[in-house]
Image: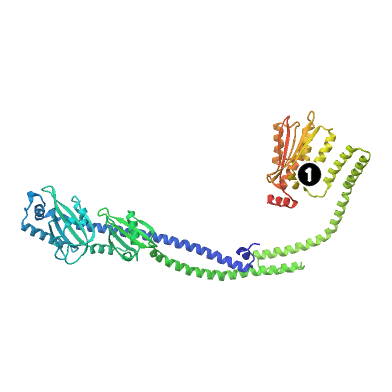
């Protein structure tokens, strides 16, 4: 017995079933459509936010490039000051130029540096460093430590190894002020004397980190997005928004270090985030934008709310509509059902009142017509029943003669036995058995054992007729005897082998009868060593079998067997014939291995469809 929701639903009354189907037909599309709409909206918003965020970081990168280009101009100013060149030459450790600068030159260099401080408010410190370590510097914050050693600071290693190009020094804390430390980043340049042709020192300008913070703070990545500015070494120069307090910053730094340009959605720190980045070819700095995916979900949250509201309204309306429709459908069906119960109780004059011309009205009209036809049939059956009994009596009388003949043959056999005519008695017994087999019942399904016995009785009679012109070799598989076969399916094949194969052969012939169980089939084979057939005649015979053509009179039995087998078991079964002129013929009959008549009939129903 089946269990679960399907049998329960099948047994429901029509009205609740209609209401459920109406609800499903609306709710399921709503859920599917809503899910698709929500997903598509989220994808579109995500694509838009990713593009907007990428444009933001690219614009910030361009702004930073422009800012660095502006401040880099100041690192070239020593080339415009003769006093600065004389000072650096005089302290360059080149004997030719040692002490070639004056106090006035030093004073002029100090004034030059003070003027640089006045050019930009974001400059914290500016200094000229000679090759022998002498430093002339000015700071916006006040006095500078006198013994500050530029050449021992590892942070300036890249500047010391440069060859006159712009050099960016990462964000760091100052260690040369008496008034405390400040976070700055630096731009420096190794100064070349164009007159002498060698490097004479360095210029180093420190800029307050607030300049970068100001640029980064002007960039907006969504409502809760953050911006991360990294130098070319991967050091954080600035971070804004929630990222400054986020635990996932280290993961983002690791991802940013592995990827040059990003525009993707990744899981970072247990949260889903959009990561975009832009790398400046001018400075090597990387701007990274980080946007929590929650921002996107918040933007499509309104769509979800509207969808829920519409869904509730639709479900309510559909429920009310289904109640009205189901009532209109069920009421005439219940009226029809009530009338059918009256008919079941014997009231064949009951009729359904038809109130509409729709399908249910047509069904009621058809039911009324059916009842009228039933009444006519009932009257007809009563008048025909007597004639049927008369026909049965006539059929019973028609069976007297066959039974009379069988009984007469049996009496003659007994007389032959009494007169010691054993061969005649055996022939009569075989003929009587054949006759009894042919009139036995009306069934067409018999045991294989009976079919084989019938064929052997026939062979016995033919051997007497042909005076032992042939011998018979039988090979029967005991396993096959418990299965069923079609009545008179083997004997016509044996008959065909004797009449068309052995009868016309010169000398004595042989007949082989084999019955085997093969896999799920029973295979009968009747083979003779008679005259056989040429290829043309064989092809003609096989063609008649396969094409269901009308058989010639000499092979009518084979066509009859083949057609009956296929009617019972399908196109995959029946006869196959192989023959060679002068060598003999082999006929193979294949049927499925079936153990009962009931299973045979189920097989018929199955293959007919």
Colouring chosen for the image of the structure: rainbow
The residue that mark 1 highlights is: 451
Q: Residue 497 location in percent, x, y?
A: 77, 36
Which residue sits at x=25%, y=56%?
A: 65
**Horizontal side of residue 66 vs 349, given as left or right:** left
Q: Residue 268 location in percent, x, y?
A: 38, 60
**Horizontal side of residue 352 vs 248, given as left or right:** right
Question: Does the image show residue 551?
Answer: no
Q: Residue 171 location in percent, x, y?
A: 24, 60
Q: Nearer the viewer, residue 590 or 478?
A: 478
- Quadrant (top left, top right, bottom left, bottom right) of the N terminus: bottom right
Number of numbered tags placed on the structure image: 1
Q: Residue 465 location in percent, x, y?
A: 85, 34
Seen in the picture, residue 392 relative to 495 is either above or below; the reply is below
- For label 1, the SS is helix
Mark 1 neighbour density, 10 Å: few (under 14) some (14–19) many (20 or more) = many
Question: Does the image show residue 317?
Answer: yes
Which residue sits at x=59%, y=70%?
A: 324
Q: Nearer the viewer, residue 280 or 50?
A: 280
**Horizontal side of residue 47 vs 393, given as left or right:** left
Seen in the picture, residue 474 relative to 218 is either above or below; the reply is above
Quadrant of residue 284 in the image?
bottom left
Quadrant of residue 341 in the image?
bottom right
């Amino acid at each position: 017995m089946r269990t679960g929701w399907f049998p329960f639903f099948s047994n429901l009354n029509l009205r609740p079933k209609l209401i459920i189907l109406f609800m499903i037909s609306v709710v399921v599309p709503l859920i599917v459509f809503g899910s698709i709409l929500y997903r598509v909206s989220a994808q579109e918003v995500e694509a838009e936010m990713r593009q907007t965020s990428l444009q933001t970081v690219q614009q910030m990168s361009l702004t930073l490039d422009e800012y660095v280009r502006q401040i880099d101009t100041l690192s070239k100013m020593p080339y415009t000051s003769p006093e600065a060149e004389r000072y650096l030459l005089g302290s360059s450790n080149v004997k030719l130029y040692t002490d070639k600068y004056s106090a006035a030159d030093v004073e002029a260099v100090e004034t030059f540096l003070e003027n640089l401080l006045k050019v930009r408010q974001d400059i914290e410190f500016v200094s000229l460093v000679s090759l022998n370590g002498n430093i002339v510097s000015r700071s916006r914050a006040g006095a500078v430590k006198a013994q500050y050693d530029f050449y021992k600071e590892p942070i300036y290693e890249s500047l010391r190894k440069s060859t006159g190009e712009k050099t960016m020094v990462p964000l760091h804390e100052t260690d040369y002020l008496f008034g405390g430390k400040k976070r700055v980043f630096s731009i420096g340049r190794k100064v070349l004397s164009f007159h002498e042709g060698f490097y004479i020192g360095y210029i180093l300008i420190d800029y307050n980190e607030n300049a970068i913070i100001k640029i980064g703070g002007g960039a907006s990545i969504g409502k809760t997005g953050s911006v991360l500015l990294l130098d070319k070494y991967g050091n954080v120069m600035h971070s804004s928004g929630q990222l400054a307090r986020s635990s996932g910053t280290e993961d983002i730094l690791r991802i940013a270090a592995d990827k040059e340009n990003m525009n993707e959605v990744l899981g970072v720190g247990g949260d889903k985030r959009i990561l975009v980045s832009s790398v400046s070819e001018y400075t090597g700095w990387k701007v990274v934008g980080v946007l929590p995916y929650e921002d996107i979900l918040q933007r499509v949250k309104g769509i979800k709310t509207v969808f829920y509201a519409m869904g509730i309204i639709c479900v309510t309306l559909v429920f009310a509509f289904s109640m009205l429709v189901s009532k209109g459908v069920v009421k005439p069906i219940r009226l029809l059902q009530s009338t059918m119960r009256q008919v079941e109780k014997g009231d064949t004059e009951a009729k359904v009142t038809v109130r509409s011309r729709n399908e249910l009205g047509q069904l009621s009209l058809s039911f009324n017509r059916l009842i009228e036809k039933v009444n006519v049939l009932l009257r007809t059956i009563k008048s025909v029943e007597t004639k049927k009994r008369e026909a049965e009596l006539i059929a019973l009388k028609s069976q007297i003669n066959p039974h009379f003949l069988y009984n007469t043959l049996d009496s003659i056999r007994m007389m032959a036995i009494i007169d010691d005519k054993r061969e005649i008695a055996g022939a009569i017994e075989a003929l009587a058995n054949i006759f009894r087999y042919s009139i036995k019942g009306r069934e067409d399904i018999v045991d294989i054992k009976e079919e084989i016995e019938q064929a052997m009785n026939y062979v016995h009679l033919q051997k007497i007729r042909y005076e032992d012109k042939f011998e018979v070799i039988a090979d029967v598989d005991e396993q096959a005897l418990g299965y069923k076969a079609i009545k008179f399916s083997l004997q016509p094949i044996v008959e065909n082998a004797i009449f068309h194969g052995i009868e016309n052969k010169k000398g004595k012939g042989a007949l082989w009868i084999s019955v085997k169980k093969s896999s799920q089939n029973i295979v009968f084979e009747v083979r003779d060593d008679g005259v056989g057939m040429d290829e043309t005649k064989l092809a003609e015979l096989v063609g008649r079998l396969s094409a269901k053509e009308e058989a010639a009179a000499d092979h009518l039995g084979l066509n009859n067997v083949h057609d009956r087998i296929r009617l019972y078991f399908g196109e995959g079964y029946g006869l196959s014939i192989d023959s060679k002129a002068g060598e003999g013929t082999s006929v193979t009959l294949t049927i499925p291995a079936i153990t009962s008549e009931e299973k045979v009939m189920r097989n018929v129903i199955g293959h007919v469809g």
